[in-house]
Image (cartoon, rainbow, N blue to C red):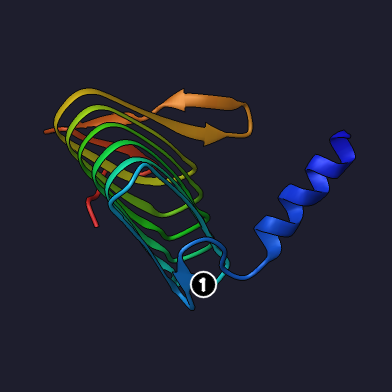
Amino acid sequence: MRAVIAISMFLVACSASSGPCEGDVCECRGGERCDYACGVPGCSGLCQSLSDCDGRCGDACDLTCADVSTCTLTCDDACVVTCERLSTCDVECGADCDVVCEDASTCRVRMISGVARCARVSECDVACITPAGDVDATDCGGGVFGCGECAVP
């Protein structure tokens, strides 16, 4: 059974886009829940006015969640992620990430390297993924947290 689940997850991860996607654009507006996986480099994903959103993409993605209760976004390297006007945003990305969380109750970010900016967020939790395990990001001041350098892109 575990092998079937692992194979299913691999096929979804390796496929082209799934869910509400056309080419390199995935959009979900209104409703209860939206799940999408974009297999095209440079994908653009948007979840707006939903209860829950779960979005996944590869490298160089631009992902946005706005006016969503709970949002979970996962991407590889060089992603730009924006979470605004929501309850909870969970982001996991690879290297060179640029994450913005605004007007949120909770924003949790895990990344290899990059910068996360939190504005008007009750709980901003940013962790850096290292070979030895997760470590807290550097507090760069002004709601900016960095894994690697503190420079804001």
Query: Where is residue 83 shown, x and y percent of the image?
Result: 26, 44
Query: In percent of the image, x 62 and y 70: which residue is there?
Result: 16
Question: Could you tell me which quadrant the C terminus lies in?
Answer: bottom left
Q: Mark 1 points at which residue?
A: 41
Which quarter of the figure has residue 29?
bottom left
Query: Where is residue 96 shown, x and y percent of the image?
Result: 41, 54
Q: Is residue 123 left or right of residue 6?
A: left
Question: Could you tell me which quadrant the N terminus lies in?
Answer: top right
Q: Residue furthest top?
A: 123
Q: Give above or below for 149 relative to 121.
A: below
Residue situated in front as seen by the camera: 140 or 24: 24
Query: Where is residue 17 shown, x and y percent of the image?
Result: 56, 68
Q: Is residue 129 left or right of residue 72?
A: right
Report the number of numbered marks: 1
Query: Where is residue 118 shown, x and y percent of the image?
Result: 19, 35
Which quarter of the figure has residue 52?
top left
Q: Which residue lies furthest to the front in this view?
A: 31
Q: Give above or below for 29 relative to 146.
A: below
Q: Is residue 153 left or right of residue 54?
A: left
Query: In percent of the image, x 63 and y 33: which residue is there?
Result: 131
Q: Is residue 80 left or right of residue 105?
A: right
Judge the density around disc 1: few (<14), some (14-19), many (≥20) Cα neighbours within 10 Å. some
Amino acid at dot 1: Pro
Query: In percent of the image, x 77 and y 50: which residue is there?
Result: 8
Q: Give above or below for 135 relative to 71.
A: above
Q: What element carries label 1?
A: loop
Q: Give above or below for 61 relative to 41.
A: above
Query: In percent of the image, x 52 and y 26: which residue is there?
Result: 134
